[in-house]
Amino acid sequence: MRNYEFVTVNVFTGTRFAGNPLAVVLEAAGLGDAEMQAIAAEFNLSETAFVLPPDDPRHHARVRIFSRTAEMPFAGHPNVGTGFVLASMAGDPPDHYTFEEMAGLVRVHIVRDGSGAIAGARVAAPRSLTIGIGIPTETVAACAGLAAEDIATLSHTPLVASVGTPFVLAEVSSVAALSRAVPDTGAFRVAAGQFPVFEGQISLYLYAWTGGDERRLRARMFAPLGGTWEDAAAGSAAAALAGLLTSIAPGDNLALQYAIEQGVEMGRPSMIIASAVKTGEGPVSASVAGSCVRATRGTLEV
């Protein structure tokens, strides 16, 4: 019997048992691919992170991220949570961590509160914004259980965007319409068959502007074919959205920040601070930040 220590943490929140829960398996060397996938399924969270020795000694760790059904190249809340956990457990943590991941190198900046205590992390997406294929409005509406007129298309039509992991991004006409959304698994299966690029899994990120501050939003994320009926806080999707919105904003040199509320309909309110930078000469880069609270600690027997 092999034993592995784990910690669970609530990410993108300062309140225990709110936000997006994450399991972090520490010193996971020795676990095989199938074992990691089985452990992620056992935790039954949107993602589980496994911390391994880095391939390059100049980096702090190799981090592998698994959803309930598959390994992911990059995800936001696992990186925020893993950085927070490692820094909280270190006697003298660095200000930054560099993680090796499938999508590339991920830089994690540790965030402290006014008293100097470790409070969370900010994660730079490993890739610049890429915009992929457009998705028909009717397809998005069917997947979300909404009417076609609930999908707003003035700023952009539904499309695929990524800063490490691809998402279908679509604006919804109002927060009320967003709250009515219910994923239709059958419609997701039809869409996955129509668009082979998704390899059988579609992650749909819906958002609506909340009014008042021009850069405050409410969002929801559905990926039922991957085992996540709804995600409480999708950091990599929020980073992709920040990149997209910044890319279409007027001006050539911009650094914009967005406050994205998610998880409200699930009873796990989360707050993601997503930022993006664009210049006239280069690609759009994005990052996400948030607070964390440790929830549990234990030992896995494998």
Image (cartoon, rainbow, N blue to C red):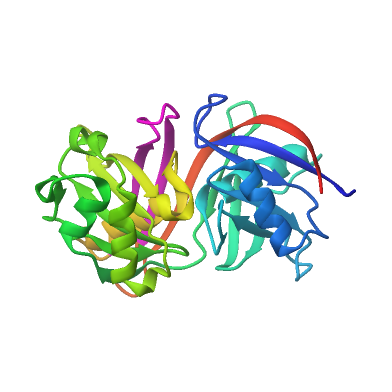
Q: Quadrant of residue 145?
A: top left
Magenta: predominant secondary structure element? strand
Residue at the spot 38% in from the left edge and 37% down from the top edge: 262
Q: Is residue 275 magenta?
A: yes
In the image, is 199 to the left or to the right of 26?
left
Residue 3 location (% of width, % of height): 86, 45
Q: Is residue 35 magenta?
A: no
- Residue 168 position (above or below residue 257): below
Q: State how many labels appear.
A: 0
**Which residue is situated farthest in the front direction here?**
186
| Residue 71 in the image, given as x and y percentages of width and height | 58, 61
- Residues 93 and 38: in front is 38
- At horizontal 26% and vertical 63% (from top left) the residue drawn is 159
Identify the residue at horizontal 59%, vertical 68% (top origin). 102
Q: Is residue 197 visible?
A: yes
**Residue 86 location in percent, x, y?**
72, 44
Q: Position of residue 109 (x, y in %)?
A: 59, 49
Residue 160 seen in the current view = no
* Quadrant hosting residue 93: top right
Q: Residue at x 28, y 55 (%)?
A: 187
What stretch of residues is rendered in magenta? 253-277
Q: Residue furthest right?
A: 1
Left/right placement of residue 256 relative to residue 142 reads: right
1 lies left or right of 45: right
